[in-house]
Image (cartoon, helix red, strand yellow):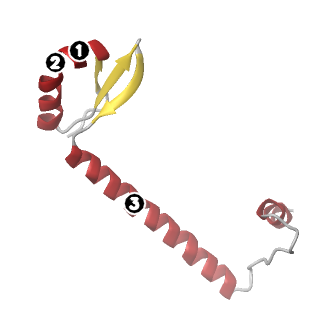
């Protein structure tokens, strides 16, 4: 189970203890935030976690696009679709539909 507060280390710790830090990140399957001058600079995660995050993000993006697409199809079938005029931008159309 992932902690709500991530482990944080500074750049100097990473330089001195690279192998131990990477081993701990892999073992605990938790990201490590690297601080530079007290500010978050980079997050370290092992490749397995990274690939899982990428896979999850792609799935969520696809789900979102499918939902938007299905909504658009439903609105088109209900004849609620709006066709912009040649000179109109999407923002122009959205403003008209809100008025």
Q: How far apart in space, not on screen, are marks 2 and 3 (Cα)?
A: 34 Å
Residue that appears at 67% across and 80% down: 75
Which residue is identified by label 2?
17
Which residue is identified by label 3?
58
State the quadrant of the C terminus: bottom right
Relative to 69, 17 lies left or right: left
Marker disc for residue 89: none
* Pointer 3 local density, CA inside 10 Å: few below 14, some 14–19, many at least 20: few
* Numbered marks: total: 3
Q: Along the line of sight, which residue is nearer the eye, 42 or 27?
A: 42
- Comes first in the chain, label 1 or label 3: 1
- Comes first in the chain, label 2 or label 3: 2
Relative to 91, 5 lies left or right: left
**Residue 66 percent coordinates (x, y):** 50, 72
Label 2's element? Answer: loop
Label 3's element? Answer: helix
Q: How far apart in space, not on screen, are marks 1 and 3 (Cα)?
A: 33 Å
Which residue is identified by label 1?
13
**Residue 55 percent coordinates (x, y):** 32, 58
Residue that appears at 25% across and 33% down: 3
Relative to 5, say whether 90 is above or below.
Answer: below
Question: Mark 1 or mark 3, which is nearer to you?
Answer: 1
- Assess whether mark 1 and mark 2 are in contact (beta carbons under 8 angstroms): yes
**Residue 31 percent coordinates (x, y):** 27, 34
Q: How far apart in space, not on screen, are marks 2 and 1 (Cα)?
A: 6 Å
Label 1's element? Answer: helix
Residue that appears at 82% across and 74% down: 84
Relative to 16, say whether 18 is above or below.
Answer: below
């Amino acid at each position: 189970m992932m902690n709500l507060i991530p482990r944080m280390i500074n750049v100097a710790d990473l330089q001195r203890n690279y192998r131990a830090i990477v081993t701990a990140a892999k073992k605990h399957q938790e990201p490590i935030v690297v601080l530079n001058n007290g500010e978050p600079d980079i997050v370290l995660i092992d490749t397995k976690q990274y690939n899982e995050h990428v896979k999850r993000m792609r799935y969520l993006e696809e789900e979102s696009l499918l939902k938007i697409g299905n909504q658009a199809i439903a609105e088109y079938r209900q004849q609620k679709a709006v066709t912009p005029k040649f000179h109109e931008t999407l923002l122009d159309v959205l403003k008209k539909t809100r008025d």
